[in-house]
Image: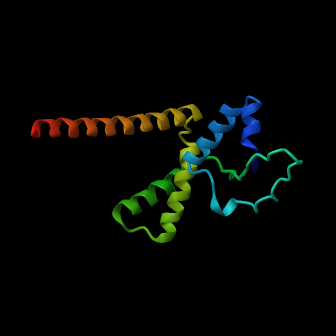
Amino acid sequence: MSISLISINDACASGASSIVASRVIASVNAEFLSPSAHAAPPPPPVAAEGHEVAPTMNIVLQDTAVWSHSKEREFSRLAALRATGKATREDQQAFRELQSVRRLKKNPVPADEVIFQYKRREMESKLLANLQDYVAFLESAHRS
């Protein structure tokens, strides 16, 4: 399955911005994109004289299988190998692939939750920076 998003700006103008953005953010956050699945880039768009061409972004999504009991057992086996440090490179790669599928299929996270978590992390980061600045300010005031 592949989806081409031609002109994010056009999608936003048509009212589909939250749906498109949510799906793209959720896809990226869940490691849904596969470097091996990317198609060749399309030819650059040609604009009529006096018109701008919106940027083009192609996203190719893998069609993932259903999460099964056998995949869960294999995931647990590979996780145990990783935890003990006995996993080979092939085991590591298989674990990462199963982990991506598991995140999507076993316990999928709604796009709204992904966006909420992102915003929360950003706010926490800013709060921490402000607290560090405040502590530095208080320490410098006490030294004076």
Q: Position of residue 138 (x, y in %)?
A: 18, 35
Which residue sits at x=47%, y=35%? 117
**Which of the pair 40/9 is nearer the observer?**
9
Report whether residue 69 is seen. Answer: yes
Among all residues in the image, which is located at the extreme right? 48
Q: Quadrant of residue 129?
A: top left
Among all residues in the image, which is located at the extreme top? 15
Asked if residue 15 is positioned above or below residue 65 in the image, the reply reads above
Asked if residue 104 is positioned above or below residue 82 in the image, the reply reads above
Q: Is residue 144 left or right of residue 107?
A: left
Q: Position of residue 114 (x, y in %)?
A: 53, 37
Q: Position of residue 43 (x, y in %)?
A: 82, 59
Q: Position of residue 71 (x, y in %)?
A: 55, 53
Asked if residue 82 is positioned above or below residue 8 in the image, the reply reads below
**Which of the pair 118/100 is nearer the observer?**
118
Which residue sits at x=38%, y=37%? 126
**Which of the pair 36/19 is nearer the observer?**
19
Asked if residue 131 is positioned above or below residue 101 in the image, the reply reads above
Report whether residue 68 is seen. Answer: no
**Which of the pair 101/8 is nearer the observer?**
8
